[in-house]
Amino acid sequence: MVKLKQRGWGLVSLVIVGVIGVGGCGQSKNTVSISAGKAGVGYDLISEQLGRSTDRIVSLKLTDDKNSNGSRDNLDRLVQGRVDFALAQLDVSRDLLRSGKVETVAILGHEYLHLLVRADSPFKTLTDINGKRVAIGIQGSGTNFTTTQILTRSGLRVITSAPPLKEGLAKLKAGELDMVAYVGPLGSSSIIQNAITSDPPLRLLEIPPSITNHLAVRFPESYRSSVIPAGTYDPLRPEPPQDLPVLSTGIGLMARGDAPADQVGLMAWSILATARQYASFYPELADGDPAGLLQRGGVYMAPDATETYEKGDPRSAWLRFIEENQVVQEYLLVLGLSSAAGLLVTWLRSRRSRQLVKSSRQALTEIKEVHGNKTKAALAAAQDLAERYRLMFIDGNLSPETYEEIDRPVQLYLQSCQALIEQEDRQTLSETVNLLDDSEALLNMPLSVAVQRLQELEDRYSQMLLSGTIELMTYLQFRQWALAVLQAKSHEPETPAMS
């Protein structure tokens, strides 16, 4: 009994998958939008990988205008409904996550607070920059938010400015600033990499564990104490020379709390299915458990994303539902069998229609080849062909669509035959008029010349009769006319008779 049910369920699954497969063919790709960051920064690289994942796995096209200042800008656009997804730091997103306005679809890595100073500066740790000039990141950026948080919690008083990253680094190298803050994934920013290694070189400051631990305990959904491994940015100098204690926060892919469930599920599945490709932003994904890592630190995960990480492709949710409901299985078994029969009938009708269309076109081609220049014979044969299919349509043996597909080329050929016959009739009339005009000329010719001219006309009209260009009656009328001309010239000396 169990085996019978399993076989029946397998048949239902096969039938339903077939139906859905037929119905789904030809659907165009959907498009979703994301706000990430400017070209070349860490968020932009993550956005590009997301685009590759969604395109390959779930046929979603991801668009990004690459014109954001960072996490705050991204979240503002998301909440306002201007984009479908946003990349943002977990600490910047904290209040929106708590309110339910946004939810986390995936944790895509961790961003580290980089505190950069000149390599020849006397500063060793964050506490050494009290009273100094610090670039904390442009307004609206995650760097600005995180740096402000740590400066406030550490009780430091500094002179802050908010230039763009490149400008801030240039001022630091020129001695116009004492420290520049940057928040981003390890090694993902070519700007930071070049700034550290180019002259004058820069180095990273340690953040005392007492400060990072305080923030990690106070805001566990946002921060954790971390380290930047030795040699991350320069293996020769090296930089940092040893594992450097710092603060980190998660990179979250965010969606609105009211985002469509299927959209969130498909995005989560595209990431899970290609998780190893995010290892450059999230190294643990290279050999860790993707489903767990993509949720690690995400306190406010979107339920549809969590379900996807637990159960797999959301497009198979209907299949899982059926597997768990025996009554639905039995109902669908009956429905599936009837649907299969309906599909078979539809397929057979479609196949017969294609065969009829093919045979009608072959018949039309044969008419053209057999009758050649005999236009009137070709017209009659094509009319018979058109009538045959018209009767089949009247009897209900042809669908309107199939009949129209068959009849259209036949009617076009009939029209071309009729036009050609009309042209030939006009030519015959013209020839007859020319003959009448030639009568007077023939009467004035010597008998031998007139007989030769009439012989040429006789040959021409014989060929026209044989080719079907003129009717037999037209040919006989020509013969009568020729005899009349000869009788009129009977007074001439006797000449050989015309064959």
Image (cartoon, grey):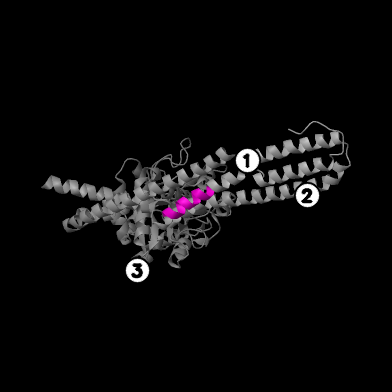
Which quadrant of the rendered structure holds the C terminus?
top right
Which callout, 3 or 2, points at the residue further toward the start of the chain? 3
Q: Nearer the viewer, residue 54 or 395?
A: 395
> Which amino acid lies under the numbered mark 3 shown in the image of this protein?
Ser
Q: Nearer the viewer, residue 420 or 311?
A: 420
Element assignment for label 2: helix
The reply to whether the C-beta atoms of the residues labelled 3 and 2 are less than 8 Å apart is no
Which callout, 2 or 1, points at the residue further toward the start of the chain? 1
> Looking at the image, can residue 61 be seen?
no
Residue at 34% across, 52% down: 346
Tell me the residue that label 1 is attached to.
373
Q: Residue 287: x percent and y percent?
A: 32, 40
Which region of the structure is painted magenta? 382-392
Q: CA distance from mark 2 to mark 1?
A: 24 Å
Q: Give the label on residue 73, or none.
A: none
In the image, is 345 to the left or to the right of 499?
Answer: left
Query: Counting other residues with Cα less than 10 Å from the Cα at mark 1, is it few (<14), some (14-19), or many (20 or more)?
Result: few
Q: Is residue 39 magenta?
A: no
In the image, is 356 to the left or to the right of 67?
Answer: left
> Which amino acid lies under the numbered mark 1 shown in the image of this protein?
Asn
Q: Quadrant of residue 298?
A: bottom left
Q: Residue 371: x percent and y percent?
A: 57, 40
The vertical placement of 499 against 141, above or below, is above
Tell me the residue that label 2 is attached to.
433
Q: Give the label on residue 99, or none.
A: 3
Q: Which of the two discs, 3 and 2, sits closer to the camera?
A: 2
> Which amino acid lies under the numbered mark 2 shown in the image of this protein?
Val
Q: CA distance from mark 3 to mark 2?
A: 98 Å
Q: Quadrant of residue 88?
A: bottom left
